[in-house]
Each structure stands twice: as C-alpha cells, then as structure tokens.
Amino acid sequence: MNGPPDPVDTAFAGVLTQRRMLADGALSATELVSLCLERIARLNPRLNAFTAVRGDDALAEAATAQRAIDGGDQRPLLGIPFAVKDDLDVAGLPTSHGTGMNGHAASSDSDMIRVLRAAGAIPIGKTTLPELGTHAFTASVAWGPTRNPWDLSRTPGGSSGGSAAAVAGGLVSFATGGDGGGSIRIPAACCNLFGLKLGGHAPDLTVHGVLARTVEDTAALYDVIRGDQRLASAVAQPPARLRIGVTSRLGLPAHVAADVRSRVDELAETLTALGHDVSPVTVRPGNWGVPFSILGLRLLESQADPVEQRSGLEPSTQAALRVAGVVPDSLVGWARREQRRITGRAARLFETLDVVVTPTMAVPPPAVEPWSGKGLVRDGLQMSRYYPFTSLWNFVALPAASVPIGLTPAGLPVGGQLLGGPGSEATLVGLSRQLESVLGWPELRPSSLGS
C-alpha cells in the first residue's frame, strides 16, 4: 500500500504533477496549501521572498477548491497555490511595487490574477521586487534583500527575484513575474528556472508572465493566461532542424565570465548533437542603449503613478524620476523611431536564422551585498556589465527565454538565452523542452535550505 506523498517531493513536483495528484486524490487542496504555508513560514525568514501571505484566506479557498474537485471540476489549475509579484493587485492585500509607501489594500484583482483564479489557482501571497522594479537584483529599503535558494549569499536576480526565490525554494510551484529588461529571464538564470518572455507590442517594454521550473508547466500556464493551447502543443512536438546562431555580444560591452562561457559552449555542443545547425553569428543591432534608457525612464514614471508618497522613495529612485520628468516628448519620439528601426533590423536577422543563443547573464548570480542602492548611475553601470544580453529583446518586443544550462563548480546556476523572431514562442518552447529532456534541470534542487 502506498503511503502519503513525500512532502518535499510534492513541494518540488511542479504545477501539472501537483494538479494530477489533486485529481487522483493523492493529496487534497487543503493539504497542498498547508504544505506551502508551512514551507513559507519555515524558509521565508532566510529567503525574504514574500511581502505578505494569505494564510487563512488561502486555506478557505483551498477547501472550496477541494469541494469542486470532489464534484468533478476539471479546471486546469484548480487547487494550485501560487505567488504574485507585488506589482499586481490581489484583492485584500496592498500592492507595494517594492516601496514602503502603499498601505491601502487593493479592492480587486489585476487581470492576470482574475484569469488564474478563474482557472482554479489560489494566490497564497505577494513576492518581493526592487523599488518600482527598477533593478536586476531584488533588494529595497522597505523590504530588505531577497536571497537565492542556491546560495543565500547571492541575489536571485530581479526584478522578479522574490517570485524566482519562492519557486526555486519549493515554496510554490509557480509565481507571476514581469519582464521589462530581463526581469523574468535574469531571475530564472540565477535560480535554475525556465523563464519565457512572450513577444510584446512596441513601444511597450514590459510583458507580464510567470516563473516555473519546467517548460511544460510554463507552457500550460501561458496557455491558460492567453486562452489557447499553442504552447502546450509545442511541448509535445520536438522541433525540426533549426538554424541557430551563437553570440556573446548584442551591442553592449560584455565580458563573459569563464564559468558562464564554458556552459554556453557546452550548450552549443548539445544543440549540435540534437541535430541543429549551430554556428557563430555576429549581431549588429545598432545603438539601442540610449533609446532604451529613454523609454525606460518614461516607463518608470508610469510605474510611480500608484505611489502615494513619492517623497518616501529611495534616493536613487527619486533621482531617476527627476531625470524622467525633464525628458522632452521630442526625445521620446526619437527613441520610438529608433525602436522601430532596430526592431526591423532584429526581425531581419531571422530571415536566415531560427534562434539566436547568448548567455542570459555575463556572470553567475552576484553577491547580495553589493546591491545596496549606490546611486542611479553606479547601479546602472554595474547592472549593464552583469546583464548586457536581455534588455535588447524588450526593446524590440520579441520573444526570448532563459533555460538552465548547468552549474558552476561552486554550484551556482547558469542560464542560456534563446532569442526568437516575431511569433516564435512555440519554436522557443519546443527547443527548450528538447533541451530540458537532455539537461534535466528540474531534477536539481538547491541544498542551501535543507529539505
């Protein structure tokens, strides 16, 4: 006779496996939510991944979900707890945007949360981000630093670092994120997760999405969010022979650490062994850094709109907002024209290629301590050295993914970035699933937290 499922194995089982366990009666929705709440209570003091937890409410919703399961309800996410990056509204909880300024509870859910709830998922809490999501690390004066489950002295990246830490630590099976310059892909690379950024709509930079361990889970979640089954179909169908270019330059200076470069070289060898045509490629996107920064400043202004008391924001955030406030519309217009021009150039790259591979980050996950708000310019320069590969694909609003490609000798995760052309999400998902079947990253668990 089989005993009850192992709680650690259950915590790391992933979305679809947990859903099958609920459907088969191997555990109840209340037991699954209780397991997540227990792990949050025990492990979050070390990770600092959550800003708020919906304990009693989540348990009540789990009981309702279990009655629906018992009644034959087959919604795809019924009974699955998840975490919400604290830039989306969950009714009854404040939305901090990484600040300490917003104390009023939201009156309703954001659109994505409504869709996930309608599919049966249960929001269990809100996760940390840097103030207004402005950094590729996750630390703020209001909430302190968030730590990486693979090494508590390291950052989980940002800005969706709290979500990534929660998933990587087995506190939840998935969490929402947002990617405005790499904010899903960078935490995915730091935390051994799969991170997919969907294609967007210029001039927007940010695309909301999710973080999970497996490609199949991620595809299923995006299909729920988008209301179709295109990505689930891509998971089930191995890709045809692809033309893949590999590069370590996307228009910004980049010094790639040896530990990262060796993993990317191994990724290229793996792709060749899988039957794809792999070769070096030179990418010349043009001067995208300045127009990206101008549009980023306008985005920051909109992100600051919900803040109740701007005078209480961090000095570096206030400095950035002052700069944003004097950027003339004529300069924004120039940046958008450059965006259209460079987007066209990036799209033409895929007339002869299907996918471009780069490192996701130039370095393994950096230490937590250097990220202490040293100022707008110094933080920006340091981040551009560590993360020179992700922002361009936000600027051109094209799909991109980060796949775990191994660990450094010190046991730190390394990510490889897959860049696609217009409408290439299914190609990226299919290739990522093929790599997952060979590399087996979902089987790895961080050891720094214990069980």
Image: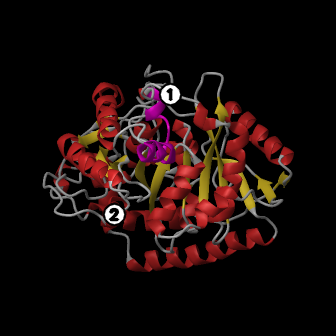
At 34% from the left edge and 27% from the top edge, which residue is drawn?
43
Q: What residue type is labelled 1?
A: Trp
**Vertically, is 200 above or below 11?**
below
Secondary-structure class at tag 2: helix
Q: Which of the labelled discs sits on residue 150, or is there none? A: 1
Q: Is residue 141 left or right of residue 296?
A: left
**Residue 440: image x %, image y %?**
66, 36
The reply to whether residue 194 is in sight is yes
At 39% from the left edge and 63% from the top edge, which residue is drawn?
297
Number of numbered callouts drawn = 2
Magenta stretch bounds:
8-24
Q: Which amino acid does label 2 sit on?
A: Ala
Please, which colouring scheme is shown?
A: secondary structure
Residue projecting furthest to the left: 104
**Vertically, is 390 above or below 421?**
above
| Residue on which the image places disc 2 | 118
Which is more foreground, mark 2 or mark 1?
Answer: 2
**Residue 292: image x %, image y %?**
51, 64
At 23% from the left edge and 54% from the top edge, which residue is drawn?
95
Where does the C terminus fall, quadrant-wise? Answer: top left
Front residue of 127 and 383: 127
Q: Distance between the residues labelled 2 and 1?
A: 33 Å
**Residue 396: image x %, image y %?**
58, 68
